[in-house]
Amino acid sequence: MKDYNIEKIRNICLASHGGSGKTTLAEAMLYDAKATTRLGKVDAGNSIMDYDQDEIDRKCSINLSLAHFNWKDKFLNLIDTPGYADFMGERIAGMRVADSCIIVIDVASGLEVGTEMAWQEADKMNLPRILFVNKMTKENVNFREILEKIIERFGTSVLPLQIPIGSGSSFKGVVDLIEEKAITYENGKMTESEIPDDMKESFESFKEKMVESVAETEDSLTEKYLDKGLSREEVITGLKAGVTSGKLFPVLCGDAFSRAGVDRLLDGISKYLPSPKDRPPITGKDKSATRENSPDAPLSALVFKTLVEPHVGELNLVRVYSGVLSSGREVINSTKGSAEKISQIFLFKGKERIEVKEIKAGNIGALVKLKNTRTGDTLADKGNPIVLEGIDFPRPAASIAIVPRTKGDEDRVSSGLARIAEEDPTFSVKYDAELKQTLIYGLGELHLEVVVSRLRRKFGVDMELVKPRIPYRETVRRKVEVQGKYKKQSGGRGQYGDVWVRFEPLKRGSGFEFVNGVVGGSIPSKYIPSVEKGIRGAMQKGVIAGYPTVDLKATAYDGSYHSVDSSDIAFKIAGSLAFKKGQETADSYLLEPISAVEVVIPEEYMGDVMGDLNSRRGKIQGMESEGTLQKIKAAVPQAEMYRYSSQLRSMTQGRGTFSQTFSHYEEVPREIAERIISETAKEKEQEK
């Protein structure tokens, strides 16, 4: 492979809402660049970028994928990312290691929530970007309308560099404002010609605004513009500087399916988007540690995705920011402080791998057989380590319980889930001993369905999805004083323990507090810890429905003992008896976990979503604007959030996202508590 200077490299991430045509655009780019002889299609299941079987079956991207190719004198690393919220972790990882971003907009669907989220993430990462208005061949679309919405949402820094010639079935191409030519397409072939007469007035208006916007990015350009205007070269230079600094966001348009405008987008990437050299020096977690984006600087590289593949093991996708990663070299995983030896190195083009000897600063590749390196880890020089910022992945918002359909598959399930968790930082699994269920957690039901599909396909185990049990709790409403007395005589030495305990409620979230209030020696101090153990043990199964008891204060204040028959076990049993008697008389009640829920939706869905949250016994805590989106904050019982992501997707046509975290416990309403107690009793009866 030709060795490209860092100035010639472009690392670009495709990001937007699902269904906007990112993967189709990637396929068109590869075909136009002659990196492939076949134009892959998502619907046909033969695209280069969506090669995973689940992606082929579902006809949508699930994983980020890489492809490198040449365009004219540039070397491009293209990162295609999923658009659906269930797989946003892949998008965040891809954007984290890109130097720029292409925001793809479906002209017919407009600004969808996934597009807005991608824009916000690009803002957080200070990524230069180009907007590509796609699907211009769709009927009844209006470029100017979508452009107005883009400018309204993303600001006046949005700058069209083209205007379309026609739309729908009459879409022929674009007028290029910089080249001052009409670019038309027929059967994939591009032709340059003069600007049509009926578009010259529109061209002059757009051109003037474009040059003004470029001139306003720098004082020196403003002075030249006001004095004698800007030359074509000055506009191009100023445009690249404005894009690199985040002051300008060019807008191009076309149709990825027919490849119209794709070559111009590739030209725009080459001309206006930054090389790794144009980006600021990389900074470590320790802000004083920096690395120049240069192959001559000490090594710094970030692992942004881990793949586990049969017969290969782990593959770590890595972006090299500085220095050189070469086969046979020893480096340090500075995140974990462990040594690693680099063996094989690959570049990716979809699932195709090309082995190389090294990857230099600015490039992206894959490493195999690293011992202790995972997503988010930094690789560095052993003698000059640096730890880079990791990747801020979203926390799982949905959960479900799984049960193997075949007994004896438990070990394979456990192994398979662990492997999937290594690949996907937004997925986790745990066995809940209290609930006696294996729970899997992800960003939505679709995410979890894909996990189960992978288990079946890769590890040969079939799973049943069941509703997770809810970790209810019990507590008391009033203070009581009770006696716990245990006396047993059966010949020989007996057992005797007698304790009086005061039980009283504590503030919610306080847990358990035990106080030794015994004075005068009515119970020897050596037995007091046994009383506490007995109470703590009994608290694990409350008397209402067998759930753990919380927020309780127990004060042992009196009792009696026998010099021969008393023992630790006797006082432990006495403590447990006191607890059971106390909970029966202290007006016990049931608590349920409450989730802090945040829902982000377009404003037109506010009524439906708020009504649905209210129907789930949710309490609206507040609302705030996020651009054209609205964020609703609510406290909702965990029991009511089962399969919420599917319902939200249905209500908002896939345009809503949500997150939830545990907040606190609250009392269950009486009629619902009665139902829970009855259902729990039936479950226990069936388990016998």
Image (cartoon, grey):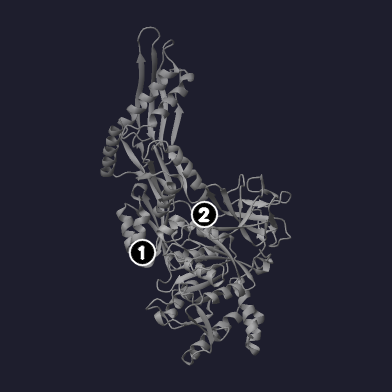
* Rendered location of residue 224, percent (x, y): 66, 85
Q: Secondary structure at mark 1?
A: loop
The crowd level at tag 2 (other Cα within 10 Å; few <14, some 14-19, many 20+) is some
Extreme-bottom residue of the structure: 197
Extreme-front residue of the structure: 37
| Residue displayed at 47% across by 44% down | 416
Quarter of the image with the C terminus is top left
Viewer-proximal residue among 10 and 473: 10
| Residues tagged 1 and 2 counted as in contact (Cβ below 8 A) | no
Please name the residue that numbered disc 2 is placed on: 393
For the image, the number of numbered tags is: 2
| Amino acid type, mark 2 | Phe
Quarter of the image with the N terminus is bottom right
Viewer-proximal residue among 347 and 626: 347
Q: Relative to residue 291, is residue 571 drawn left or right?
A: left
Viewer-proximal residue among 462 and 106: 462
* Rendered location of residue 247, percent (x, y): 58, 73
Q: Quadrant of residue 577?
A: top left
| Amino acid type, mark 1 | Gln
**Residue 289 showing in the rendered view:** no
Label annotation for residue 422: none
Please name the residue that numbered disc 1 is placed on: 653
Q: Quadrant of residue 107?
A: bottom left
* Rendered location of residue 18, percent (x, y): 43, 64
| Residue displayed at 70% across by 61% down | 292
Extreme-top residue of the structure: 492
* Rendered location of residue 309, percent (x, y): 53, 49
| 583 versus 245 height, above or below | above
Of the residues under marks 1 and 2, which one precedes in the sequence?
2
